Image (spheres, rainbow, N blue to C red):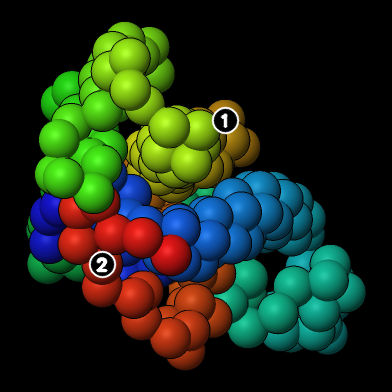
Amino acid sequence: MTANDPLDRVIGDLAHPLRAGERALHDIEQRTRAVEAQLDHAAKRIDRAIVAAAAPLSRGVDVASHAAAHGLDAADLELSRAIRQCRTGAVRSRGLVDDVVEKVSGVQAKLTAMLDAVRYAARIETRDAGDRVVASSTIGWGGDSHSAMHPGLTEADLQLHLRRLNVTLRHRRSRVKFVAVILGGLSRVLAASSGGGLTALPALYRFVEQVLDAFEDLPALPAETPGATP
């Protein structure tokens, strides 16, 4: 939907479920479930990074060893370091501050674009073999939906339409959840920092993207046309 949407490459663009047939829907459902689980896991990892950043370093123990003791991997360590810098006010020079402000503004724009993408009303149409619309649903910003069904709608077309509707809802919720994980992490960083916590936003965004990087190796979603059959 937008170049600022990191989930396009993971579960496909927002329009994909609207036109997907059975084969594509199965793949989208699997990916979406996996992404939801990874986002839940990312929130827990962010909390561990915050705890590690807040804990004082023992004498003679380096940051990497300290992080390992808190169960952090390389990506977690990078995030924990960024949070620790926020807590200690390590970003001080004018040049570094300007760079951080620019990065924060860029991430804020990306998150706003992701939410803007799901504010429009999505319309799902299912057509029969004669290309006649036999089911139509509209999904609003709050997840509310309105549907109209043709009297001649078959059971198979009804089930296909309901699956498209369900997958579209989850597709849209995934974008909201992605933003919520980052902003939720940011609020916890701000609560644990005396000031400057907003500078952790780029690191939080980069971290959640890294959590989803494993999906890059999955095969591309199969291209299907409106009304495609399995």
Disc number at residue 73?
none
Work out whether residue 63 or residue 79 is closer to the camera in this orientation and state it: 79
Circle 1: residue type: Ala
Mark 2: secondary structure: loop
Give the side of residue 58 with respect to residue 169, left or right.
right
Mark 1: secondary structure: helix
Asked whether residue 183 is in view, the answer is: no
On screen, residue 220 above or below 166: below
Percent from the top left, x then y, of residue 2? 12, 54
Q: What residue is shown at x 18% (from left), y 23% (from top)?
A: 121
Percent from the top left, x then y, of residue 82? 48, 64
Work out whether residue 207 or residue 195 is closer to the camera in this orientation and state it: 207
Asked whether residue 3 is in view, the answer is: yes
Q: What residue is shown at x 50% (from left), y 33% (from top)?
A: 155
Circle 1 packing at 10 Å, graded few (<14), some (14-19), many (20+), is: few
Give the side of residue 111 with respect to residue 58, left or right.
left
Image quadrant in which you'd find residue 203: bottom left
Cα gap from disc 1 to disc 2, whole angstroms: 47 Å
On screen, residue 33 above or below 211: above
Indicate which disc, 1 or 2, sits on the residue closer to the N terminus. Answer: 1
The residue singled out by tag 1 in the image is 191
Q: What residue is shown at x 26% (from left), y 73% (from top)?
A: 223
Circle 2 packing at 10 Å, graded few (<14), some (14-19), many (20+), is: some
Work out whether residue 30 or residue 77 is closer to the camera in this orientation and state it: 30
On screen, residue 67 above or below 217: above
Q: What residue is shown at x 26% (from left), y 28% (from top)?
A: 134
Q: Nearer the viewer, mark 1 or mark 2?
A: 2
Percent from the top left, x then y, of residue 44? 72, 50
Give the side of residue 98 with respect to residue 216, left or right.
left
Give the side of residue 37 with respect to residue 15, left or right.
right
The residue singled out by tag 2 in the image is 224
Percent from the top left, x then y, of residue 99? 15, 64
